[in-house]
Amino acid sequence: MQKRDTTTTGGLLSLRDVADHLGISERHVQNLRFRRLIPAIKLSERCLRFRLSDVERALEKLTIREIQ
C-alpha cells in the first residue's frame, strides 16, 4: 500500500488512489460509492475525486464494534 501525498492535490484522491490506500479493488470502491456508503466529489462528467478524510469517516461508521 502506497501512501499518497494529498497536500499537493488539495486532499482529493482518484478512485485508484483510494483503492490503493484501502487495499481494495477499484471496483469495490465504485460499489461503495454507488451504494452511497462513501462520499465522492464529481468534478465533471468523467472526473470523480474522493476526500480521504471523508472516506475514512464514512467507513468508520460502518465498522462493527465488538460487544463486551
Image (cartoon, rainbow, N blue to C red):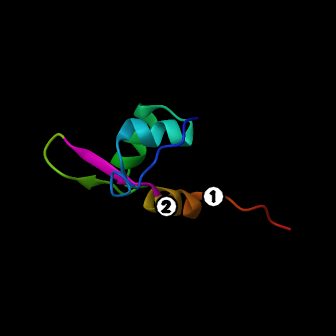
Q: Name the residue under label 1.
A: 63
Res 15 → quadrant: top left
Question: Crowding near pointer 2: few (<14 within 10 Å), some, many (20+)?
Answer: some
Residue 68 position, x and y percent, is 86, 68
Residue at x-position 42% and y-position 33%: 26
Left or right: 65 in relation to 43: right
Indicate whether 23 appears above or below 51.
above
- Assess whether residue 50 is covered by the magenta stretch: yes
Residue at x-position 55% and y-position 36%: 2
Amino acid bearing label 2: Ala
- Dividing the image into 4 quarters, which one contains the N terminus? top right
Left or right: 64 in relation to 13: right
Please tell me whether the stretch drawn in magenta is mainly helix, strand or loop.
strand
Which one is in front, 4 or 53?
4
Q: Mark 2 points at which residue?
A: 58
- Assess whether residue 5 is covered by the magenta stretch: no
Element type where label 2 sits in the image? helix
Residue 28 position, x and y percent, is 45, 36
The CA span between labels 2 and 1 is 9 Å
Tell which circle, 2 or 1, labels the residue nearer the N-terminal end.
2
Toward the right, the furthest residue is 68
Amino acid bearing label 1: Thr
Residue at x-position 33% and y-position 51%: 9
Residue 27 position, x and y percent, is 41, 32
Element type where label 1 sits in the image? loop
Region rendered in magenta: 47-52
Which one is in front, 16 or 33?
16
Residue 14 position, x and y percent, is 34, 42
Which one is in front, 64 or 19?
19
Toward the left, the furthest residue is 45
Indicate whether 30 appears above or below 40.
above
Res 51 → quadrant: bottom left
